[in-house]
Amino acid sequence: MTASVDGQRPEDTPLLEVGDLVVHHGQLKALDQVSFQVFPGEVYAIIGANGAGKSTLLRTIAGLHHPTSGTVLFDGQNVTGLRPEHRARQGIVMVPEGRRLFESLSVEENLKVGATYARKGPWTIERVYETFSWMRDRRGQRAGQLSGGEQQTVAIGRALVANPRVLLLDELSLGLAPVVVQRIYTMLPQILQTGLTVLLVEQDVSQALRVASHIHCLLEGRTTLQGTPAEVTAEEVEEAYFGLASAVGATPHARLDADGQSGKGSEPPWRG
Amino acid sequence: MSLITEVGAPPAVGFRVTRSRRNVAWTGIGALIVVVVLAMMPTIVYSGTTAILVQAFIVLTLASMWNLLAGYAGLVSVGQQGFVGLGAYFVLILALHGASPFAALPFAAIGCAVAALPLWWLVSRLRSGYFAIATWVLAATIMLVIERFSSLGSGTGLPLPGLSGLSATYLAAYTYWAALAVTVLAMLAMYLLLRSRVGLVLTAIRDDEVAARSSGARVGLARMLVFVVAGAGCGAAGAVLAISQLQVQPSAVFDVQWTAEMAFATIIGGLGTIEGPIIGTAVYMVLQQTLASYNAWYLIILGLAAIVVALFARRGLWGLVDSRLHLRLFPVGYWLRTTSGNGRRGLGSFRGARTGTS
Amino acid sequence: MAWVNAIIEGILTGGLYALFACGLSLMFGVMKVVNLAHGDLAVVGGYIAVGIILLHVPVLWSVVIVVPIMAVAGYVLQRTVIQRALDRGVLTTLIVTLGLSLVIENALLQFFSANTRGIGSGMTLVTGSFSLGSQIQIGYLLVVVFAVAVAVLLGLQYFLSRSTYGRLIRAVADDKEAAQLAGANYRHVFGVAAGLALATVALGGIAYGMYIDLDPTAGTDTILLFAFVAVVIGGLGSLWGTLVGGIVLGVAQQIGAQINISDELIAGYIVFLAILVLRPQGLISRRAQT
């Protein structure tokens, strides 16, 4: 499913704009000059191998890491110096890697914590129960006792009740059975109908290509590929993902930009 | 010839790991001179001065032991006064049975080391903060047990027998030498322990306990050894205390203030450095001597200083000196040094690779 | 009959010890801080009450004034000092709270001298007692303190399980980063928990001043150590465990005192050591509300 219609992009103002982001973990440079824009209603997928810096990128946008340099703009406003809780209250809400539920709290209490500082919007605990009907029956159960897939769903519910404007999903599929992952991803269109923008990190490229309107590949902290799923070929993704290009001798960090000259795919680029 | 090999070697690949920097020999000679000069003190100064120095040696010994526990093994004990008291009572018991208190001193240290084993077995089940208070409870329990013996003077204690034959001058000098010997031995023991394999394990624990455990380091054993050595050291200091006070009183030797003093001297001087307790003890003695007439004020200032240092200068006063001068009097770590290129620069750039005192 | 009397008194003293302990347990459960100044802060609460009573304020009103003062002090202390220490690691929190303990204790010595001070020593509540049968005498104070302790624990439990802030406190205790992602400022939540902890221990300090007498060293010699022993006996991190632990400690002490008056303290510590050896997870092993 692709939420944004080609050709409409340039007219919108980006909801989230990341500019020249550099993040260090101690001495290690985890992200190097990463820039991109996410437009309202998009599903923007960050892909890349283990250690490519995907999670670091998401955590920096959520405010859990401080960048060495670069900016994060949200709805045109600079939020780079803001604490995570303030970003969450403004509508940047993340479902962290590994779900991170409050394990000693019940399912309903987890949702209530998520709703404590919620913005006004369509999502309520009741609506989460309507969307994921099993949850209502088990709302009194301790979150730590749920299965992995159930926990992931509750984690999404906890983020939704905050009525985010942009939802950050970090490695939804991690440690879950493929069937469960599939079930969670099929819920995505229904969630998007409520006017959300999604920025997700996914190691499973085929899954990302299926749901995303735009993909962005990272390799060792650098951008190696950007474009719509239709624009990029499987070979390009493979090169960008594994960094084989430099080994083969082709241009490293082959980049697809919005200027259109790299459209090897069948669809025409945005400006036509 | 050597020039050719150096040029021929690929740059920045050759390196060697060195243990001590050149100044260790000078430090050794310097330390020896200091000890000799200190040993001559009773022939130079009045006994009032040596009495103050005895107090300083007690604090320095205690601080070094606490530094070993908290700064290297990550064990924050608030119950080291238990060993101070035990050491004092070992001396008293042996003296009551006719031994010379000075001859009893080493046995007090050994007795405390032995006592530390079952105590470790008890408190090692608890982590960090709970370990801290558990050691405190143990110290209180030991005091309560000892107070039950009327032969040891119950709650009021007893004067220390066996020293009345000595003239005041000789007693002061012997006490001073005993205190000096305890301090030198305690610091030497700590230095050797940290340079041994145990020191390496301790460094590994401090950097990353989980990783140290999974790589097979015998974390529990190393910590136990530190607890035992620190028990012996604090016991020896307690024995010196008993001799210098000429009496043993339970509420005085088991006072938690001993732990407060050893902890804060260490923190102010620099936790996790051998030099730190020396500096901290000097600061402590100056505070105590200048503010002694204002009762509790020196302890209030000491506590506040420790809080400020812990929050704003984690490595203490020595850390401030070290970060400016790159000085290390007692190296216990390893240095990775490139054999090619500029040696001095290599040292600087590999500072992060240094293990040991950081 | 002296034995029955002793056991009843021990059980009721457990309430006092629970007041000492529940704040310690709460702070450890929520922010993993073992506050070594916990007992001294109780004594500070007691001394503030002494000061207020000197201004001819009725004793019970002093309680109403002191508890909120200590709650605010707890919040401020957490936000300014303890949080800073926490950001630097567990070791620093221990050093800083030990430093606080030394500073408070010596400041009290400096300003109030080592003399003991009682609270409400002329009141029937403090000195009066009633009889059960012909042999058993029970002091009003111990019954009231026990009832207060139970009420405090019930209140804490209700607050933690039902209120928005209670839920946030538990959420932050589970995972403070995830709580941040849900919009919660964990530093503020920590402050609230510290405020609660000091409010409860201030009650303990005042009750101690009524039951025995306050002196500057009571905070470490008695309150902190008893609180800790009660926490370990009851089980780390368990709220009602502090009452169970307090009762076990109180009964052990009273039985010890019956054997020999000087065995009161030692008996309590022996039970503590036995629990440490036989059942290190405490008597209530389930990690309860906090």
Image (cartoon, coloured by chain):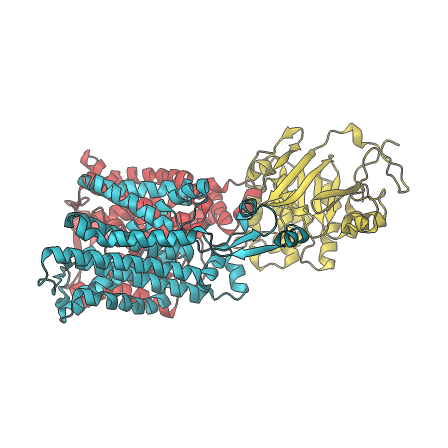
* Number of marks drawn: 0
Single out the residue that lies furthest toward the right.
A266
Would residue A89 be found to the left or right of residue C27 on screen? Answer: right
Residue placed most toward the observer, C68 or B145: B145
Residue B21 location (% of width, % of height):
47, 52
Residue B34 location (% of width, % of height):
30, 51
Q: Quadrant of residue B231?
A: bottom left
| C77 versus A143 height, above or below | above
Instruction: Kindly identify the residue that appears in the image at 28 percent across and 43 percent down.
Output: C104
Q: Quadrant of residue C195?
A: top left
| B257 versus B298 height, above or below | below
Q: Which chain is painted in cyan?
A: B
Rendering colour (chain C):
red
Instruction: Kindly identify the residue that appears in the image at 43 percent across and 64 percent down.
Output: B222
Q: Which chain is painted in yellow?
A: A
Q: Quadrant of the N terminus of chain C?
A: bottom left
Q: Quadrant of residue C82?
A: top left
Would residue B242 be found to the left or right of residue B70 on screen? Answer: left
Residue placed most toward the observer, C129 or B345: B345
Q: Is residue A205 visible?
A: yes
Single out the residue that lies furthest toward the front.
B1
Would residue B13 be found to the left or right of residue A245 on screen? Answer: left
